[in-house]
Image: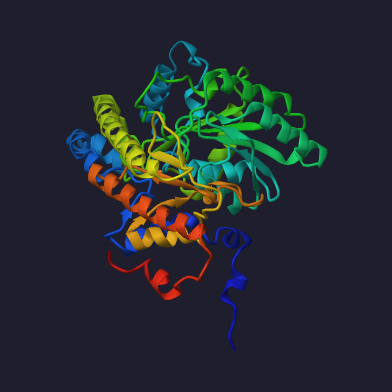
């Protein structure tokens, strides 16, 4: 008798099914000749081999220090690294830095995604609500769904969530009886993944003011995902969200060394309101009772030696050149096509592109199939919008310039332009049907 083996799976396992990031990565890995403008990976040629080797040599030179690094650490994380992270954060915020932050508010995790998962487990019950920008980080949308909660997008422009739009959304939720279920607003304040937007200082103040006024049933948190803060190529830095949190009880700052140093090291961190520290650590204790200690000791050594700062400067120069190459290629190739728009980010790793409304960039649309035939891959923009609302972003895409070489960027953009041109032509002529076998085989066929 055949049995449905999935019947014994948890509800969370069902909620987690079908993550788009896994499918996109599988497509890229299945065809090594594919030019991926989708993956948000860092450039392998920039990985800090020399800095890591020097740090490891110092770390292992003293047997006592070496044994400590190879032993279990605490759930909270290595004290020295937490001290260095806090000092670096306050220095970046300059005159507006919060001087009342306590070291106990800093915790270390295995990358910032682990912290986002821990926050979801700590704050959200099934049916709870998190407000997000439209578009937003697609993996976070999966995290919210994985705990049975809902992500609701708020009106957003080139500067991020619009305070008046957040207020209107909260008003509508109050009228429908859902306001008590709103637990947080999530945003990427610096060079938003996927659209590259940075929230200006005045808007940061306004967003926190809106959340404070609408925290009528309980405190509504603001989760600030700072994965890209160091990857700025133009203009001055902006003080962090926590600088404008008057009571110091609302903003959750998260960060990572994955984009600015090495994803393989997998060290993330958070600066949490005091009331959240113990609940999050209790959750973390059930997961790992201490993230990889050696990686934390390594990052502390790198920061102490100035290796991190040297590496960030190199990354800024490298990615600035790649961003300019992608913008130039967009102008050269996409600029010839009608009604295509893209944003000029001042940092991060992504370019956001909007196509004519009749072009479906999604997984079932013609453009993705045409792009795969050309040998190029992008992230369909619809993945970056909350799925419980009407389909949004079906004519958008996220392009990444991080992992590709300059030549790869130029070639990939030319291929993408050809795919878009054919799709536009097909949209303007009567449909004769597609060629299923040819298009289906494009995912794995060598180019």
| Count of numbered circles in the view | 0
Say left or right for 50 vs 12: left
In this rendering, position of residue 293 left or right of residue 218? left
**Viewer-closest of 426 and 114:** 426
Work out which residue is located at the far bottom of the displayed protein and give it. Answer: 1
Note whether 380 is above or below 255 in the view shown. below
* Location of residue 90 in the rendering, given as x and y in whole percent from the top left corner: 43, 18
Left or right, residue 441 beside residue 410: right
What is the image's colouring? rainbow
In the rendered view, tell whether residue 181 sits above or below residue 252: below
Can see residue 301? no
The picture places residue 434, in percent across and down from the top left corner, at 47, 70
Q: Please name whichever residue, 313 or 117, is drawn nearer the observer in this view of the structure.
A: 313
Q: Quadrant of residue 151?
A: top right
Q: Farthest top residue? A: 95
**Residue at (36, 30) in percent of width and height:** 231
Residue 399 horizontal/vertical position (percent)? 40, 45
Which residue is rendered at x = 53% and y = 67% of the image? 431
Q: Quadrant of the N terminus?
A: bottom right
Q: Residue at x 38, y 71 (%)?
A: 441
Residue 335 image point, x, y percent: 39, 40
* Residue in front for this viewpoint, 168 or 353: 353
Q: Quadrant of the C terminus?
A: bottom left
Among the 4 quarters of the image, the one containing residue 45: top left
Q: Nearer the viewer, residue 217 or 316?
A: 316
Res 95 seen here: yes
Residue at x 32%, y 46% (from the top left corner): 264
């Amino acid at each position: 008798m055949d049995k449905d083996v999935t019947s014994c799976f948890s509800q969370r396992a069902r909620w987690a099914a079908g993550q788009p990031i896994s499918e996109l990565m599988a497509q890229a890995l299945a065809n090594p000749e594919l030019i991926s403008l989708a993956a948000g990976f860092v450039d392998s040629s920039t990985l800090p081999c020399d800095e890591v080797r020097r740090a490891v040599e110092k770390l292992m030179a003293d047997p006592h220090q070496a044994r400590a690094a190879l032993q279990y650490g605490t759930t909270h994380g290595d004290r020295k690294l937490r001290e260095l992270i806090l000092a670096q954060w306050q220095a970046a915020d300059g005159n507006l830095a919060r001087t009342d932050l306590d070291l106990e508010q800093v915790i270390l995790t295995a990358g910032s995604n682990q912290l986002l998962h821990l926050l979801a487990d700590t704050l959200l019950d099934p049916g709870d609500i998190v407000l997000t920008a439209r578009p937003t980080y697609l993996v976070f949308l999966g995290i919210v769904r994985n705990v049975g909660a809902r992500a609701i997008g708020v009106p957003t422009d080139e500067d991020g969530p619009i305070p008046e739009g957040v207020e209107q959304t909260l008003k509508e939720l109050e009228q429908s009886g859902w306001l008590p279920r709103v637990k947080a607003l999530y945003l990427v304040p610096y060079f938003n993944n996927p659209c590259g937007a940075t929230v200006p200082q005045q808007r940061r103040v306004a967003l926190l003011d809106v959340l404070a006024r609408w925290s009528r049933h309980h405190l509504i948190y603001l989760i600030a995902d700072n994965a890209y803060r160091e990857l700025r190529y133009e203009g001055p830095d902006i003080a962090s969200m926590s600088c404008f949190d008057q009571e110091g009880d609302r903003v959750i700052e998260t960060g990572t060394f994955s984009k600015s140093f090495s994803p393989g090291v997998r060290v993330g961190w958070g600066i949490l309101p005091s009331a959240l520290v113990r609940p999050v650590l209790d959750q973390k204790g059930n997961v790992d009772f201490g993230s990889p200690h050696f990686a934390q000791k390594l990052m502390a050594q790198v920061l102490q030696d100035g290796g991190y700062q040297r590496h960030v400067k190199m990354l800024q120069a490298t990615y600035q050149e790649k961003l300019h190459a992608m913008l130039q290629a967009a102008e050269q190739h996409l600029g010839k096509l009608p009604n295509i728009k893209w944003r000029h980010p001042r940092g991060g790793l992504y370019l956001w592109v909007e196509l004519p409304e009749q072009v479906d960039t999604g997984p079932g649309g013609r453009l993705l199939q045409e792009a795969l035939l050309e040998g190029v891959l992008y992230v369909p923009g619809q993945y970056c919008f909350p799925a419980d609302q009407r389909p949004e972003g079906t004519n958008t895409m996220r392009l990444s310039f991080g992992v590709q070489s300059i030549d790869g960027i130029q070639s990939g953009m030319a291929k993408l332009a050809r795919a878009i041109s054919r799709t536009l032509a097909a949209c303007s002529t009567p449909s004769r049907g597609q060629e299923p076998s040819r298009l289906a085989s494009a995912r794995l066929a060598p180019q």
